[in-house]
Image (spheres, grey):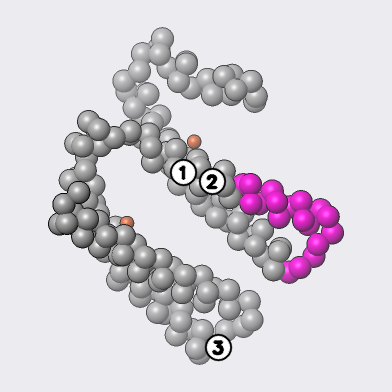
Amino acid sequence: MSTIKSDLLEGFKAEHEQLDAGITRLTETLDRLARGVDSALLRALADSDRFLQRVLVPHAEWEELTFYPAVRDVLRTHGDVNAAMLIDHREIVARIQTFAALVRRLEAGERDPELLDRARILGYQIRALVEVHYRKEEEIYCDLIRRYLSDREAPSALAVGDQLGHD
Ligand SMILES: [Fe+2]
Ligand SMILES: [Fe+2]
């Protein structure tokens, strides 16, 4: 790979790392909420609000303007258009497994408040990921099936439960 490309790709990853730092500050601030709200916490919340609006949203806008359009054709030709969905599944399943391990510990009698908190946060993470994932499946995949698959093709695409032998 050329130096130009590797430098640019490194820069892109570095930008995500910076965004991660902002998101981490946001969640750290939220973790402090349970202990009460004071002026320092309000300032931290305002900082996070500013970060989301002035850094994260413009990052997404930039991706829609240049990053995704630039990759669209190569994705179609050389990529796997389902890869993003499979990554969603992988991330959701990983959290489900971690959640299951936490539930086992609670069932075994552990009552550490931090454990309960981690289970709660993980549950919300799973919910958010699943909600976004459903949006993609319904708005993109189902719409394509509705418009382009024949009555003969649609059943094999949509009979998910039947294929796995569950409800
Ligand atoms: Fe991004
Ligand atoms: Fe799915």
The amino acid beneath tag 1 is Asp
Asked if the stretch drawn in magenta spans residue 106, the answer is yes
Name the mark on residue 2: none
Q: Does the residue labelled 3 lie within 8 Å of ligand 1?
A: no
Q: In which quarter of the image is residue 62?
A: bottom left
State the SS at label 2. Answer: helix
Please give the name of the residue rendered at 64% of the width and 51% of the height, measured from the top-left corner. Answer: 98
Please give the name of the residue rendered at 17% of the width and 46% of the height, measured from the top-left corner. Answer: 70
Residue 65 falls left or right of residue 112: left
C-alpha gap between disc 3 and disc 1:
37 Å
Asked if the stretch drawn in magenta spans residue 79, the answer is no
Up the image or down, 51 lies above or below 122; here it is below
Quadrant of the frame with the C terminus: top right
Label 1 crowd bin: few (<14), some (14–19), many (20+), radius 10 Å: some
Find ligand 1 in the image and state its quadrant. bottom left
Q: Does the residue labelled 1 lie within 8 Å of ligand 2?
A: yes
Magenta residues, start to end: 96-113
Q: Name the residue under label 2.
A: 92
The amino acid beneath tag 2 is Ile
Name the mark on residue 88: 1
